[in-house]
Amino acid sequence: DAGITQSPRYKITETGRQVTLMCHQTWSHSYMFWYRQDLGHGLRLIYYSAAADITDKGEVPDGYVVSRSKTENFPLTLESATRSQTSVYFCASSGLAGGYQETQYFGPGTRLLVL
Amino acid sequence: AQSVTQLDSHVSVSEGTPVLLRCNYSSSYSPSLFWYVQHPNKGLQLLLKYTSAATLVKGINGFEAEFKKSETSFHLTKPSAHMSDAAEYFCVVSGMGYSSASKIIFGSGTRLSIRP
């Protein structure tokens, strides 16, 4: 029972490089989310997806791209990393129709450092 | 737009004493409200949620919260703190009728410390 996993757990990259953070869930949940966590800001929603091939922007989408070709995977790509994207990134999922109004299950997070 | 304010960035209590973590929200629609807990270097875990049923919501590990519409508050309480309660706590509001950018909003968090 793996639940929701994220990879890598830690990543160091350089400004301008492309980085992809992976998220995989085994529950067949419809909704998946990407958040970033920064000191003093709590968690902020980057993108979410209601189902395969359906994605929408959250509060802070600039500089990020997502895709969802399969229900269980929701990768987040930083097309050209910037230092301001140094953060801890959390993936989450929730089931059934309630989506963001339902309980979300969070992955362990990815710590990203952009030099 | 929706918003949520956690009134204390840090709360420190002695083991065995009551815990109160305060949360105020703003929403034009009937919101769903959540409390999540995050232990160090871990993901978030749901403590409890309110979705327009009973106003007093019981959660895991002895926590509960009361939805007070007149005060737009959703404070988290526990009668007796335990050392294992030391963590970061997030109040969350979500609701229909908002743009995708503000469908779900997290508070900035309250760090709970427990003194032996």
Image (cartoon, coloured by chain):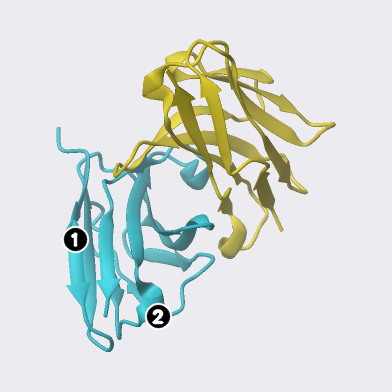
Chain colours: A cyan, B yellow
Q: Residue at x 49, y 59 (%)?
A: A44
Is residue A5 left or right of A76 when viewed as pictured?
Answer: left
Relative placement, left or right, of A6 versus B48 is left
Q: Find out whether the residues at labels 2 and 1 contact each other: C-beta distance under 8 Å.
A: no
The x and y percentages for residue A18 are 23, 82
Residue drawn at x 68%, y 52% is: B3
Where residue A15 sits in the image (x, y, percent)?
A: 28, 86
Most foreground residue, A60 or B112: B112
Q: Amino acid at mark 1?
A: Tyr
Q: Position of residue B66 (x, y in %)?
A: 68, 22
Residue at the disc numbered 1: A10
10 Å neighbourhood of mark 2: few (<14), some, or many (≥20)? few
Task: Look at the image and tell me whether residue B61 can be seen.
Answer: yes
Of all chains, the one bearing label 2 is A
On residue B89, which mark appears? Answer: none
Task: Specify the subunit that label 1 lies on.
Answer: A
The mark total stands at 2
Q: Is residue A64 left or right of residue B66?
A: left
Residue A29, above or below B68: below
Q: Of the residues shown, which amino acid type is indicated by label 2?
A: Gly
Q: Quadrant of residue A28?
A: top left
Q: Nearer the viewer, residue B79 or A93?
A: B79
Q: Between B57 and A109, which is closer to the camera in this rendering?
A: A109
Residue B103: x %, y % from top left: 59, 54
Taking the spot 49% from the left edge, 19% from the top edge, the residue there is B59
Q: Nearer the viewer, mark 2 or mark 1?
A: 1
Q: Earlier in the sequence, mark 2 or mark 1?
A: 1
Q: Report the quarter where the C terminus of chain B lies.
A: top left
Q: Residue at x 69, y 53 (%)?
A: B2
Against B86, residue A59 (above or below) is below
Instruction: Give the CA distance from mark 2 to mark 1.
Output: 20 Å
Label 2 belongs to which residue?
A: A63
